[in-house]
Amino acid sequence: MTYLTTHNLSRQFNGQTVVKSLDLTLDKGEVLGLLGPNGAGKSTTLQMLTACLQPSEGRVEVMGKPLHTDRSLQKHIGYLPERPPLYDSFTVREQLDYAAKLYGLSKEENEQRCKTVIQLCELEEVRQKIIGRLSKGFRQRVGIAQALVHDPEIIILDEPTDGLDPMQMQSLRKLIIQLGENHAVLLSSHLLSEVETVCNRVMILHQGKQLFNENMDKLKASGETLEAVFTRLIFHDSEAAA
């Protein structure tokens, strides 16, 4: 089932095109890796997909309906921006309770969903700890738990493992793979190894343009590595633009 679709999605800033005519789909059970160098337009794309930013052209559809004319559709989306919006003075449980209330969950739903995401994101040992005292790895987990607290079908993650140590990265990647079993997950990254590890489809962006969109199994069967494809496409596109 397709949960998220874009049609000719574009965004300009001060006359400069940052995202150009992007078409993508995201289905249940899929982890799509949005891959590209810094400045490729990844974060801008995610902001439009979550209705945090209005597109200059094109549209985003969530569950088959236009997102930017029906903001109630945001309830189907869980979003982790590059810097999780957390209150350092809150405990983990207080942060999740606050997020659940913002999403309009009832007291009973709040209690159940907070319990569920604390277990899923392995936050039991820090649930009563102050967020400002947590490691970055735990803060990222709290950010993901907050994005999941209202039980969305679509999960959008912007550079979720950026700045983590190897053990923290490995743990968080396992969680993302697990989430992909029952949700539609879109993961933005500039790390090829991360996309290869957790994603079953990859899309490569460069200078706001889509250069590649392929199933990972099909890519592996071709005998060409993701690194080789990425390097070739980015190099050729940069040469063409020069």
Image (tube, grey):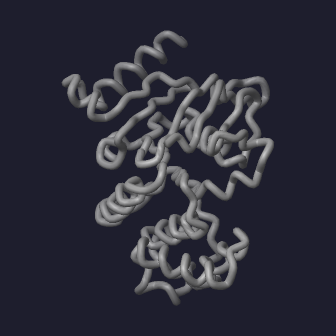
Direction front: furthest residue? 1
User: Left of 9 or right of it: where is 149?
Assistant: left
Residue drawn at (28%, 28%) of the image = 219
**Image quadrant in which you'd find residue 216:** top left
Residue drawn at (40%, 57%) of the image = 176
**Image quadrant in which you'd find residue 107:** bottom right
User: Left of 220 or right of it: where is 83?
Assistant: right
Q: Nearer the viewer, residue 97 or 183?
A: 183
Q: Is residue 167 above or below residue 129?
A: above
Instruction: Tell me where residue 71 appears, x and y as whole percent.
Output: 77, 51
Instruction: Tell me where residue 200 appears, x and y as whole percent.
Output: 35, 41
Q: Nearer the viewer, residue 15 or 217?
A: 217
**Image quadrant in which you'd find residue 162:** bottom left
Instruction: Tell me where residue 85 appears, x and y as whole percent.
Output: 64, 65
Residue drawn at (23%, 31%) of the image = 220
Instruction: Tell me where residue 24 appears, x and y as whole percent.
Output: 54, 31
So how many labels did they put on this image? 0
Q: Nearer the viewer, residue 184 or 165?
A: 184
Q: Is residue 179 above or below residue 211?
A: below
Residue drawn at (64%, 44%) of the image = 62
User: Left of 90 or right of it: where is 183?
Assistant: left
User: Left of 144 or right of it: where is 76?
Assistant: right
